Image (cartoon, helix red, strand yellow):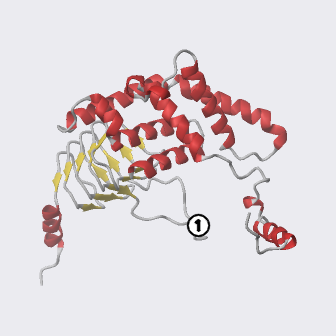
Amino acid sequence: MANIPLSDQEAENLLTRLRSHDRLDPHSGLVPSVGKEPLRHMLADLEALLFPTCANRDQVTDGLLAVEKPLGQLMHLVHEATPHHCPKNDCTERRRAADIAHTFFKTLPSIQETAIGDMDAAYEGDPAAQNLQEIIATYPGFYAVLVYRLAHRLYGLGVQLLPRMMTELAHSDTGIDIHPGATIGSHFFIDHGTGVVIGETTEIGDNVTLYQGVTLGALNFPHDQQGRLIRGTKRHPTIEHDVVIYSEATILGGDTVIGHDSVIGGNVWLTDSVPPFSKVTTKSTIALRTRKEPVS
């Protein structure tokens, strides 16, 4: 080992200064200790459990171990991702983690059914898809949405940090950023996918298709009288059933509603609602703005 240009006392003083804040002290119990690799392994095992015919051979486990392994992983990760304020309550927190994991696993058949609907939507919506196995193995949109659906179910069970880590892992792998708090209906398809952003309070209906670069974001962030962000408000748009949104479209605002059976063209910027059966393109929005301009 190379010589460290610090004396023992200097190193100790540095550590003391860096850990002087309770919120950053690794021994305070307030900093969850979840590694990305264990989480990635659990996601792979869950994917193999849901789609065993399309998983890697070394990922498929027979018998009860196929359930017990990811169940044990989830119990451990939920516990590790929970801030432990008091070591005396560790047994209680472990029981809570076990209860959450068991409840989550009982819902896996419904998650699988919804994921199969997403897979069908991809196959029906993309003529380049040769078979269903190709979609599971290669489509980043399908994988990102699958991880979102798993994370969303945990999020609904009151787990905070772990679902965010799950969708951020998928984000790093696919370029698709979906907050686990978003609400997304069945038969959802993201084609290509790179650069898609779906915010926390977004609501998406059934049979919706997005293309790469679509942003469903917040128009602004309201603050209280002290200047602090107001959390828990509806900040992101609502997309009703049977909507197609083409690449690089940006739709912002919690009051913005895209009516059912609408088509939003590429590069469109929307902060206002549109009625059902609308077709919005850059030309139509430019024309709309021109009509609103005062006559000189």
Query: Residue 29's x, y, as percent?
Result: 76, 49
91 on left or right of 108: right
- Label 1: few (<14), some or many (≥20) within 10 Å? few
Q: Nearer the viewer, residue 271 or 173?
A: 173
State the residue at coordinates (23%, 61%).
268
74 on left or right of 266: right
- Residue that sits furthest to the front in the current view: 1
Mark 1 residue element: loop
Query: Residue 201's x, y, as percent?
Result: 44, 49
Q: Nearer the viewer, residue 93 or 194?
A: 194
Q: Is residue 201 visible?
A: no
Query: Residue 186's x, y, as percent?
Result: 34, 33
Which amino acid does the dot numbered 1 rest on? Answer: Arg
Q: Nearer the viewer, residue 253 or 65?
A: 65
Q: Is residue 151 visible?
A: yes
State the residue at coordinates (81%, 69%).
11
Query: Residue 144's x, y, as percent?
Result: 40, 43
Dividing the picture into quadrants, the one containing residue 235 is: bottom left
State the residue at coordinates (58%, 20%).
65
Image quadrant in which the N terminus is located? bottom right
Question: Residue under circle 1?
Answer: 228
- Residue that sits furthest to the top in the current view: 63
